[in-house]
Amino acid sequence: MNYYGRICLDDIREEFVVKDSTGRRFVKVNINKRREPSKYGDTHYVKVWVPKAERKADVNYYIGELKEQEDQK
C-alpha cells in the first residue's frame, strides 16, 4: 500500500533535527495508523520520533498526516 500526504515543516522544531556524519540534516519520524479516518480521509499520522525518556508533556510531536493512495492505472 502506498500513502501520500503532507508534513508541516514549520512544526519541526530545530531540536528534532539531527545531523549525520556528512552533515546532512534529518528528522526521525514515526508513522501510525489512525483508529478511524479523519474527516478529510486521512488514515495515518506522522510524528517526530523521540525516545520515550526524552519526551515532554507540553510538546506537540505531531507534524503531518497521510492517506492511502488509490490505484493509478
Image: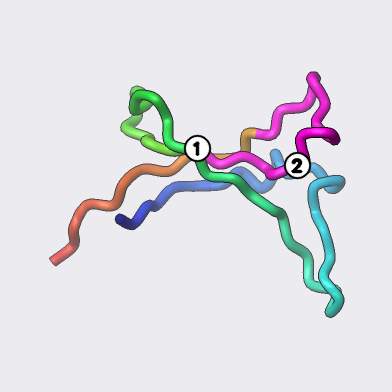
Please tell me how many numbered marks the rendered image carries.
Answer: 2
Task: Estimate the spatial distance between the alpha carbons at disc 1 and disc 2, rounded to whole Å.
Answer: 15 Å
Q: Which residues are magenta?
A: 45-61
Where is residue 48 shown, x and y percent of the image?
Answer: 68, 43
In this view, the residue in front, 54 or 17, is 54
Q: Quadrant location of the N terminus? A: bottom left
Circle 2 residues within 10 Å: few <14, some 14–19, many ≥20: some
- The picture quadrant where one finds residue 43 is top left
Label 1 vs 2, first from the N-terminus: 1
Q: Which mark is residue 45?
A: 1
Residue at image x 86%, y 46%? 15
Residue at image x 86%, y 76%? 21
In this view, the residue in front, 50 or 23, is 50
Farthest top residue in view:
58
Where is residue 55 shown, x and y percent of the image?
Answer: 80, 31
Q: Secondary structure at mark 1?
A: strand
Depicted 39 relative to depicted 23: above or below: above
Q: Secondary structure at mark 2?
A: loop
Farthest bottom residue in view:
22
Q: Quadrant location of the C terminus? A: bottom left
Q: Is residue 15 left or right of residue 68?
A: right
Whether tag 1 and tag 2 are in contact, CB under 8 A, the answer is no
Task: Return the residue at label 2.
Answer: 50
Circle 1 residues within 10 Å: few <14, some 14–19, many ≥20: many
Mark 1, mark 2: which one is toward the viewer? 2
Where is residue 7 shown, x and y percent of the image?
Answer: 57, 46
Q: Is residue 10 left or right of residue 19?
A: left
Depicted 1 relative to depicted 67: above or below: below
Kind of residue sitting beneath label 2 = Val
Q: Which mark is residue 73?
A: none
- The picture quadrant where one finds residue 54 is top right
